[in-house]
């Protein structure tokens, strides 16, 4: 049983993705979904990924999107958008 557990953990490690790789993949996905729609695509993509990773429970492989709040301000540019943690 112990050997099975070790083999299983080794297999999981071999197929798992590091956080930096995951962030890179998420950033590419965000940029693709915003492609040609928004001038500030790079800036907003980075903010989206940072917001998701800041609330993600990596151990449970879960993201509670209700923990992310988006507020709009009239008269502001998309390039003024920022992430406020807390």
Image (cartoon, rainbow, N blue to C red):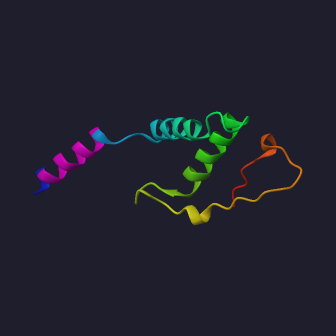
> In the shown orientation, is residue 49 left or right of residue 18?
right
Residue occupying the far front of the picture: 37
Q: Nearer the viewer, residue 45 or 86?
A: 45
From this view, report whether residue 53 is shown above or below residue 62: above
Magenta-colored stretch includes residue 7: yes
Q: Which residues are magenta?
A: 4-14
Residue occupying the far bottom of the picture: 66
Residue at left offset 68%, top offset 42%: 44
Residue at left offset 46%, top offset 40%: 22
From this view, report whether residue 60 is shown above or below residue 11: below
Q: Nearer the viewer, residue 79 or 34?
A: 34
Q: Nearer the viewer, residue 7 or 60?
A: 60
- Image coordinates of residue 30 in percent, x first then y, are 57, 41
Residue at left offset 16%, top offset 46%: 7
Residue at left offset 45%, top offset 36%: 21
- Image coordinates of residue 4 in percent, x first then y, are 12, 52
> In the shown orientation, is residue 58 left or right of residue 77?
left
Question: Which quadrant of the structure image shows residue 1?
Answer: bottom left
Disc count in the image? 0
Magenta-colored stretch includes residue 80: no
What main secondary structure does the magenta stretch of the protein show? helix
> In the shown orientation, is residue 77 left or right of residue 41?
right
- Image coordinates of residue 58 in percent, x first then y, are 44, 54
Where is the C terminus found, in terms of image quarters? bottom right
């Amino acid at each position: 049983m112990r050997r099975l557990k070790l083999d299983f953990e080794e297999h999981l490690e071999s197929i798992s993705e590091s956080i930096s790789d995951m962030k890179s993949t998420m950033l590419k996905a965000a940029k693709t979904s915003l492609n040609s729609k928004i001038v500030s695509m790079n800036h907003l993509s980075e903010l989206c990924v940072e917001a998701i990773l800041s609330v993600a429970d990596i151990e449970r492989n879960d993201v509670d999107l209700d923990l992310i709040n988006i507020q709009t301000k009239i008269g502001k540019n998309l390039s003024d958008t920022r992430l406020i943690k807390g």
